[in-house]
Amino acid sequence: MSSISNLARESVKALVPYASARLSMSGGSVWLNANENALAPEYQLTGSFNRYPDCQPPVLIAAYADYAGVAPEQVLVSRGADEGIELLIRSFCEPGLDNIVICPPTYGMYGISAQSNQVGRTVVPLTAELTLDLPAIKQSSNTKLVFICSPNNPTGDLIPRNQIVELLEFYRNSALVVVDEAYIEFVPAASTVDLLAQFPNLVILRTLSKAFALAGLRCGFTLAAPEVIGALKKMIAPYPIAAPVAEIATQALSADSQQRMRTSVQTINELRAAFCRFAASLPQVRRVFNSNANYVLLGVDDAAAWVSGIASQGILIRNQSSQLGLERLGCSQVVRVSIGSQAEMALLQQAISTFCTQQATNIRSSGEQ
Ligand SMILES: *Cc1c(COP(=O)(O)O)cnc(C)c1O
């Protein structure tokens, strides 16, 4: 190996990067491993692109503020919600001094962004009831940001609103409580957006990647008090939102597109309910986690066997067994299945049935030997 690789920062050499669904698995014709929305509308571009774009395109900011029911000063648009996470850590956490709190099993990017910015992580697993362990969170030291994902990825549960309010009060003058609402369109009544009026330390993350079916666009939003948004704007790149992105995102927020999004959410919620009934009927599934989003977590005996057994039939699902905090839930082997189109879900059920029959046959024949 050339010595050039030694030039990287020590923290970068030590870093294990995020293994995204797209990076860690390829092939397959049915992709149910990244919580994308299969019911995709098409968009047309009309503009010319010779000019630099606005850093925060006013038309797009106004459209999202209107959609979310907040003021434009409370909205930041970024390159996906992932960039919102990164900007929060870079703007509010002092490297080597401040910590973030994460409550696994949960979304992996909070920890990765902290690590890549040399910010410490305090890990406080969810309780067996999938709620926050509030006493343990409150004992954490040098806390600057508390990340709460609701609906939580990958478990699908909602964090109780009274727990979020308790943390907002506890940290009123000392830390930001970040509620990641990437999947809130699947359960809009659970949003904490109304609490922004009361708590200047509340931050909400949103995205067009999931319900709006625009994961390829890379467009997300941070909702917070104007002071918080102001700090993030100091750290964001000068031209983070490409002009075609702003144009399509604005189209996606039109009244017609919002209606289309709501229709697709309803379809996905129905397909999810049907899939959960199917999964619960299988003796090989130990637990079907109750979901409020476009994916379902299943407790199984051997997650790797599930993923490869389903992949061999052309369908990708995701092994989530490396998540921290699974022991506390009494389920160490879990796979996460994204809810695709009706045709994809029919193929998936067929593939799972085939896999489960094979498993049962294998067990029987190994018992006979
Ligand atoms: C997908 C996802 C994100 C990232 O969304 P992007 O806008 O695509 O960056 C953030 N949080 C959670 C919980 C997610 O599942």
Image: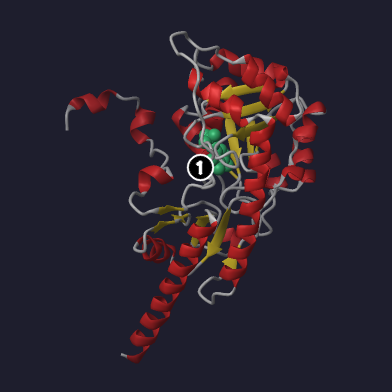
Q: Secondary structure at mark 1?
A: loop
Report the front residue among 361 and 58. 58
- Colour setting: secondary structure
Q: Residues within 10 Å of mark 1 (few under 14, many from 20)?
A: some
Report the front residue among 307 and 39. 39
Q: Position of residue 135 (x, y in %)?
A: 72, 46
Q: Is residue 29 above or below residue 228?
A: below
Residue pictured at 62% horizontal, 64% vertical:
274
Quadrant the C terminus occupies: bottom left
Q: Amino acid at mark 1?
A: Gly
Residue pictured at 61% horizontal, 58% vertical:
272
Q: Position of residue 195 (x, y in %)?
A: 79, 33
Q: Is residue 296 left or right of residue 316?
A: right
Q: Position of residue 141 (x, y in %)?
A: 63, 34
Q: Position of residue 231 (x, y in %)?
A: 62, 16
Regarding residue 150, the answer to whether it shows in the image is no
Q: Which residue carries the number 1 mark?
A: 108
Q: Is residue 111 left or right of residue 365?
A: right
Q: Is mark 1 within 8 Å of ligand 1?
A: no
Q: Is residue 300 left or right of residue 289?
A: left
Residue pictured at 64% horizontal, 30% vertical:
253
The image quarter containing residue 220 is: top right
- Residue farthest along the top direction in this orientation: 51
Ligand 1 falls in quadrant: top right
